[in-house]
Image (cartoon, rainbow, N blue to C red):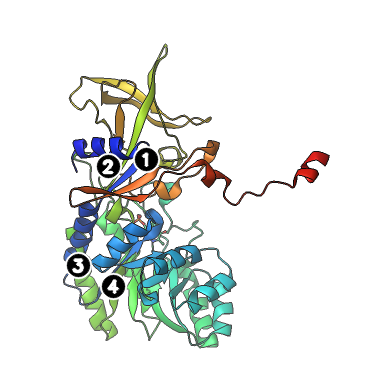
Amino acid sequence: MQANDLLHLAEQFGSPLYVYDAEKIQSQYNRLTKAFSKVANLRINYAMKALSNVAILQLLRDLGSGLDTVSIQEVLLGLHAGYAPEKIFYTPNGVSLEEIEEVHALGVQINIDNLSILEQFGAKHPHVPVCIRINPHVMAGGNANISVGHIDSKFGISVHQLPHLVRIVENTNMNIVGIHMHTGSDILDIEVFLYAAEILFDAAKNFKNLEFLDFGSGFKVPYKKDDIATDIDELGKKLSKRFNAFCVEYGKDLTLIFEPGKFLVSEAGFFLAKVNVVKQTTSTVFAGIDSGFNHLIRPMLYGSSHYIENISNPKGKERFYSVVGYICETDTFATNRRIAEIKEGDILSFRNAGAYCFSMSSNYNSRYKPAEVLWMNGQGYLIRAHEKFEDLLQNQIPLPVETAATV
Ligand SMILES: Cc1ncc(COP(=O)(O)O)c(C=O)c1O
């Protein structure tokens, strides 16, 4: 997408605005499937927590993707978007037995990540095909918040608990059809993937009826020009070879599953916001935009760095700005960033705004959530309208007048 297209979309649909480039999502999907084309049975389950707009789900469904979900609400959205139940995986953590049973009743593959629920589920439903999430105890991922496969992480069943796990499976006669792991996000080093894969292969040997191995996700994408990223082609080559060899050893053509979020949608997304005020203080020049961590929380939550361009003045002389929001908390998007000269009214574009951006947005400070637009075949399609005042009131129930008067 060109900066000019983004500028026109901001004029057409207003700001703040999320824009997603359909072609980029498609090319990322194709890159991944091509990298693993030597695996006979490959399945990509899009991790919809990254961006759950129904139009995006439909786009990925049409590309052939399955869906990775973490809540019954995500499962319902997936079904609503037209995914067959057997194309949906459910990998929750810390949810109740009742929710897992409800999801199973919808015909969706469940993945259990703790021994307590596994034992209870197995005792009640011994013949249901179940996947188990292993914690391989690998320190992987961009930072401590997004590294989820290490020894202190709440996720998965420790590999050291395999003997206990196997006993539960034998005692309940459960049908274990898959093993899963997900060690974190922003994993750069493919050796980490390969190392964790060996742990999964070892664990898999304990189960005779497997149909698939799910390697999770965590591929690192570039955040700026010349930034480093996971070498998908190299990983594809090495892991495919090792996976195919494991299938021979296991005596069955298993399905290899990945569940990427960021890889598929991060770079496809742009967040557009208007500069309300340029404020020069004694130490800093602030560009204050019509947004805040209510719309894009990742820089404050994870310290993630989104490349920011002034698309209203792309050729302007660069100056240093701190880009901040309008929320009554510190909501700094960038500190002392070199950006083409900014005037009030200019539109700033934030890159890598496809994953974990809109899906983490809120109504904090009673602000409306932004609209979302899908850019496809040179045209912008509104896929979510800007919120209105009525949206803030939806589901709120005022006290009856006479009760309010007695407080
Ligand atoms: C279980 C699981 N699978 C897949 C993903 C997607 O990870 P990424 O967006 O890094 O591809 C996540 C992210 O939190 C996850 O928790």
Q: Tell me if residue 406 can be seen.
A: yes
The residue indicated by pointer 1 is 304
Ligand 1 shown in quarter: bottom left
Determine the residue positioned at 41% across, 57% down: 49
Q: Residue type at mark 2?
A: Tyr
Residue beneath label 4, please?
256
Q: Residues within 10 Å of mark 1 (few under 14, many from 20)?
A: some
Q: Quadrant of residue 9?
A: top left
Residue extending furthest front? Answer: 401
For the point 47% across and 74% down, which residue is it? Answer: 162
Whether tag 3 and tag 4 are in contact, CB under 8 A, the answer is yes
First of labels 4, 1 by sequence position: 4
Give me the C-alpha separation between circle 3 and circle 2. 24 Å
Q: Is mark 1 within 8 Å of ligand 1?
A: no
Residue 44 percent location from the top left of the image: 29, 67
Q: CA distance from mark 3 to mark 4?
A: 9 Å
Q: Earlier in the sequence, mark 3 or mark 2?
A: 3
Q: From the image, which quarter does the N terminus lie in? A: top left
Looking at the picture, how far across and down is residue 45, in whole percent? Answer: 33, 66
Find out whether the residues at labels 1 and 2 contact each other: C-beta distance under 8 Å. yes
Q: Which residue is mark 3?
A: 36
Say what secondary structure mark 4 lies in: strand
- Where's residue 398, x and y in %? 68, 46
Looking at marks 1 and 3 on the same chain, the residue that comes earlier in the sequence is marked by 3
Q: Amino acid at mark 1?
A: Ser
